[in-house]
Image (tube, rainbow, N blue to C red):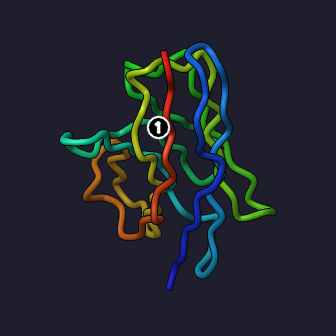
Amino acid sequence: QVQLVESGGGLVQAGGSLRLSCAASGGTFASFGMAWFRQAPGKERDFVAAINWDALRTYYADSVKGRLTISRDNRKNTVYLQMNSLKPEDTAVYYCAADTSPVNWRPTRHDEYGYWGQGTQVTVSS
């Protein structure tokens, strides 16, 4: 059983930065496809970023390209989301997700991921 625990959310002013972390336990983290999604109040859960097992491939939503960076440390079983130049529209609950069998991986689809964290709130004030 895989467990994911996010941390690092909070309140920040527009233009500021945050770094989210997602610590995984259970399974073989180094083989997982990992992703971040976010959900704003009253909206669907949207893809933000994803990273393959060896970090050689990353994927981003158009709305965050150039501002958010996903990375991972397989020694620490942790995936990160560095968030720079934050905007009020980035306000959402951010969820970490794991695909433990990323065969024919479709990294932007939420139904690819069998395991989810509890979420961490990010609020960007204007």
103 lies left or right of 66: left
**Location of residue 116 with respect to 84 vertically, above or below:** below
Rendered location of residue 117, percent (x, y): 47, 65
Residue at screen point 51% across, 39% down? 122
Q: Give how far across and how far down residue 58 sits, in percent.
A: 53, 35
At a point 73% along the width and 59% down the height, the residue shown is: 74
What residue sits right under mark 1 in the picture?
Answer: 49
Location of residue 107 in the rendering, given as x and y in whole percent from the top left corner? 38, 46
- Type of residue at label 1? Ala
Location of residue 17 (image quadrant): top right
Q: Please, is residue 98 above or below residue 10 in the view?
A: below
Where residue 1 appears, as percent x and y from the top left, is 50, 86
Q: What element carries label 1?
A: strand
| Frontmost residue, 91 versus 23 | 91
For the view shown, which residue lies furthest in the bottom direction?
Answer: 1
Q: Which of 2 and 10 is in front in this view?
A: 10
- Relative to residue 44, is residue 22 drawn left or right? right
Which of the 4 image quarters holds residue 77?
bottom right
Query: Left or right of 15: which side holds 93?
Result: left
- The residue depicted at 81 percent of the width and 62 percent of the height is 75
Residue 5 position by quadrant: bottom right
Q: Answer few, some or many: residues within 10 Å of disc 1's Cα (few below 14, many 20 plus, some between 14 and 19).
A: many
